Each structure stands twice: as structure tokens, then as C-alpha cells.
Amino acid sequence: MASQMAFMTPAPLLRGAAASRARSVGVSPRRASALPARAARRSSAAGVSMVGGSLNDLLSNNLEWSKHMTSDDPDYFQNLVAMQQPDYLWIGCSDSRVPANVIVGLPPGAVFVHRNIANVVAHTDFNVLSVIEYAVKVLKVRHILVVGHDNCGGVKASMGDERVGLVDNWLTHIRDVRRRHAVQLSTIDDFDARMDRLVQLNVLEQVHNVCSTTTVQSAWNDGQPLSVHGWIYRLSDGLIRDLGFRVDGPEGIDSVYRTVAPRPPVGKGVAAEV
């Protein structure tokens, strides 16, 4: 019930942290938050379509964006080249309607991002595992955000029995979540409500998968501050909901998944500690 209540409450925007991070990459928070709106107005005034335009439109938009970023700060891109210090790793869906930086109002350099269909963290996916390792070990992010969204096509496809194609192999990860929580899901008659709940459950399962990785466990064992969170983004109102599921250390997951660094070998000339 607590998690359902949290889902219905908009999560606070990362105002303090976002402002600090925006300043660290040379952009004022007010300017950063105004960028998407300004870009939209400029594109509209220039007659450039935001959807269905040509590749030349994209290049023109990029030129305008670059000019805008350097109009007040000529060294903006040079500063960006010299520094990448994000506090956040965002693991989200590939859906084009859920752009990480835009919906949290942060500039380039503030969020390290990995996206795939339905924000899955699979233990055999070396892509996401490599991203997590780099973010935690090299960039020293302090928060990993697993972010799902309503009306997710991957989750919707996993609820049916029609074969889609190669992606069905990937969707097996979500069907595993569906099978694991089949009793709970069977009590929800409305299809859309059932899909919303599966979206939430999938995020919670992927948070658990993140916490089970060797990279995250090693960071916790070494005392590195790191929190893993589960969020949902609502396409219908543009707001993020915090599911209220946050893990700050190995004690937050089942003991079966907890691991420690290997112990030094004993024998062959190596004396055991007394």
C-alpha cells in the first residue's frame, strides 16, 4: 500500500541538486530549465517541424542550439569537454517520449544515461553492466535511477501472447516479472490498470537487479555512497512519481544476492590469520 500511495504522489524535482549540477557544468539552473521551451519556440518561429522533419532540419536545430549555448558563455563547450561529473545514472526506456535530461531539467553533463526497451537490467547484458560499472567506478555517481513509464510498448507486448519478433526474447525478462507476480496481477480486471501495475513491478524488479550486480555490491562493500531508486514517469502529465523503493546498501536486498570480495587464499606459503 505504501508503494501504491507513493506512486500517486508526484516526486519532488531535484531542485537543489539539479541547480548545483547545472552550475558545475557552466549553465545557470534558470537557463537550463528554459532551454526546451526556447528551442520549441525558436523551431516554431522558423517553421521547422519538431516531428517528421528532414535531416537538414536536425542539423539546423543543432546549429541554433550550439549558438544559443555559447551566446552567454563562449567557453561553454570547452568547459563541458574538460569535465563530466554527473551525480545520476538514469536507466530508462528507449521510448522517444521519455528524454532523461529534458524531463528533469538538467543540462548536458549532469546525467549519465542508459536506455533500452522497457528499462530492463539483465544480468547477462554486458551493455548495461558496462554502463553501471563505468558510472559507479569511474564517474562515482551517487544515485542510480531506474525509470519506467506508463503506456510502455514493451510492457504492453509482454502482456499478450502474440509473437512480435526478435524482441520477444528481450521481453521474456518482463514476462518473468509478470509470472512472478501473477496472483497480484490477476486481481486487477482493468487492462490499463493491470499494465500500470506491471510497469511498477518491472521497475522494482530492475532496481533489485541493479542492486545485485557485482559493481554495486563492491561499491557498497567499499563504503562508497550509492543509492538505487525506482521511479515512474507519467506521459499524461509529465510528472515523475517516486515508488518509494530506495536501496542504500546490501542490507536492503535478499541475503541470497549479497556477495563480498574474495578472501585471500590460505596455503601454499600463505599463512592464515590468527
Image: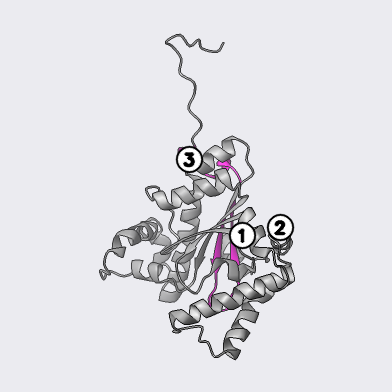
Whether tag 1 and tag 3 are in contact, CB under 8 A, the answer is: no
Q: What's the colour scheme?
A: one colour
Query: 155 left or right of 64?
Result: left
Quarter of the image for residue 12 reads bottom right
Give the camera-side residue of 52 and 74.
Answer: 74
Mark 2 against mark 3, which lies toward the viewer?
2
- Label 1 sits on a secondary structure element that is loop
Query: Magenta span covers which residues?
Result: 229-258
Seen from the viewer's position, the closer of residues 65 and 20 is 65
Side of 7 relative to 15 (left or right): left
Say which residue label 2 marks. Answer: 24
Amino acid type of disc 3? Thr
Q: Residue at x 50, y 77 (%)?
A: 59
State which quarter of the image contains the N terminus: bottom right
Measured from the top left, where is residue 233 in percent x and y? 55, 69
User: Which numbered dot is residue 214?
Assistant: 3
> Observer-nearest residue: 107 or 123?
107
Q: Which residue is mark 1?
A: 109
Say if the magenta span includes residue 150: no
Q: Which three-letter amino acid code belongs to the residue tagged 2?
A: Ser
Q: Please tell me whether mark 1 or mark 3 is closer to you in this view.
A: 1
